[in-house]
Image (cartoon, grey):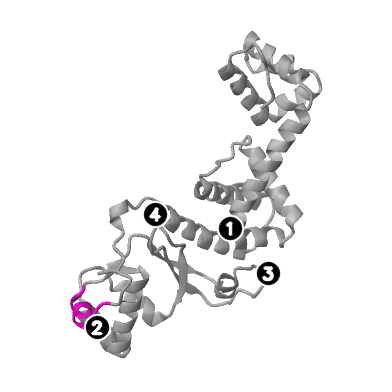
Amino acid sequence: MPPATGYDSRRVYDVWQRVLCDEALYESMLAGRHREAAASRGMSAEDMEVLDELQREPGLRWNVENLRFRATDHVLTTLRVHLPITLHLLTRGDQDWQRDVVFEYLSCHRWDELGRRMLAECVRFGKHVRERIARRRALPDLVEHALAMELGVVEVLRQAAAVPADGWNRRREPLPDAELLQARPRLGPAVRVLDVPVDFTEWLNSGDPTRGQPGLQPMALLVTVPSPEETYRTQRLSEGARLVLDRCKGEQTSAEIARAVHEELELEEDGVLALLRKWIAAGTLTA
């Protein structure tokens, strides 16, 4: 924020924020018509004096455009981390187009960047895609499928952030056989299965939307945050694995689950027990 001496610091900050957020007010300052714009907005005489001082300071355009550039860059980085497939599909991977999309998004929200609330930023951007971008041009269904999946992962991360410190009870070491058989496995504190109409496995495995192609078959995607110190993990579930996981509600023992799945799908009980042991060690299940 440029200096404006002799004024209350709180007032200067608030007026400066209005200049950043109100593009018409900012443009009027560049044209020297800011008093008219301020009057139409009901700003006080003291506010107008601050505007006068800010308008006289050298580098007004640079200060504002630099802050907007940095805000755009920060949000773009966030989206490339958490919504990479959606962003790629929206812009065909064109980085200049991506910057334009994010610039317009922030402009629509009066340059109210959410800073470190990166997951909330992703949710708000998803709403922008559905309510603004999708109204201006016909988006392929693949965009919505990718957005729903990636926002589903974001929701698991938000769920993990809300888990209290004593809510994580992951057991990293494999359970002994006797203990495993008697355990009543249930989902961990930050676990979700996403039903996706297309198969994004190749993109998820590569971490690069330019490598691989989406498959035509639907997939069930298991998303797990094992602990506060670890990043999330994804796994494409087979029909059998999905059935096993659906039975893990803390009501049946592992032995009962293995027996029931064997009777329904003829899967080997030892294989089911091995899968349960693996998921418990990975933090997908607690027991």
The N terminus: image quadrant: top right
Q: Is residue 55 left or right of residue 132?
A: right
The part of the chain drawn in magenta is 175-183
Look at label 2 and name its amino acid.
Answer: Ala
Task: Looking at the image, tell me whether mark 4 or mark 3 is earlier in sequence order.
Answer: 4
Name the secondary structure under disc 2. Answer: helix
Which of the numbered marks, if any, corresponds to residue 81?
1
Q: Residue at x 64, y 75 (%)?
A: 212
Name the secondary structure under disc 1. Answer: helix
Q: Is residue 182 left or right of residue 155?
A: left
Look at label 1 and name its amino acid.
Answer: Val
Residue 143 included in the magenta stretch of the image: no
- Establish if 256 lies above or below 5: below
Q: Position of residue 231 (x, y in %)?
A: 47, 62
Q: Which residue is mark 4?
A: 159
Task: Looking at the image, tell me whether mark 1 or mark 2 is earlier in sequence order.
Answer: 1
- Establish if 171 lies above or below 53: below
Q: Is residue 68 left or right of residue 215?
A: right
Q: Which residue is mark 3?
A: 210
